[in-house]
Image (cartoon, rainbow, N blue to C red):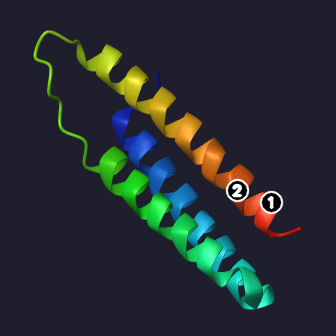
Amino acid sequence: MASKRDFKKDVDAVFATVIEECMFTGDFFPEKSEMVEKLIDEAIALYNDTRFAVKLDEKMSCKAFYNGLITNYVAKMSDILTKLNDAQK
């Protein structure tokens, strides 16, 4: 696992890129603006859940916690990106 600091920076960078792409898609395809707004809401919720995650299970090691967080983040972000790609067609 990379450092927590690098992970947080990556989450910030991916979030900014996805929001930028959503804004572009909303402007370029006005008929899909409602779908894009839902994707933005999903991205914001994922960002908040990931960036400000609190370790709930004290029995879990820090490494296991962050590995689970990364796995969850990648799966959900992949889903958002797939939906965004579909909106651009």
In this orientation, which residue lies closer to the viewer: 3 or 41?
41
Residue 79, above or below 70: below
In this orientation, which residue lies closer to the viewer: 4 or 41?
41
Circle 2 packing at 10 Å, graded few (<14), some (14-19), many (20+), is some
Name the kind of residue labelled 1 in the image: Asp
Q: Residue 56 appears at what percent x and percent y? A: 14, 27
Q: Secondary structure at mark 2?
A: helix
Residue 26, above or below 2: below
Residue most toward the left? 58
Residue 19, above or below 29: above
Marks 1/2 in contact by CB < 8 Å: the verdict is: yes
Q: Residue 53 appears at what percent x and percent y? A: 25, 42
Q: Secondary structure at mark 1?
A: helix
Residue 63, above or below 3: above
Circle 1 packing at 10 Å, graded few (<14), some (14-19), many (20+), is few
- Mark seen at residue 86: 1
Which residue is drawn at the image coordinates 25% and 49% (left, top)? 52
Q: CA distance from mark 1 to mark 2?
A: 5 Å
65 to the left or right of 42: left
Q: Residue 22 appears at what percent x and percent y? A: 64, 74
Which residue is drawn at the image coordinates 57% and 46% (left, top)? 77
Q: How many circles with numbers are drawn on the protein?
A: 2
Which residue is drawn at the image coordinates 47% and 50% (left, top)? 11
Q: Quadrant of residue 64?
A: top left
- Mark seen at residue 76: none
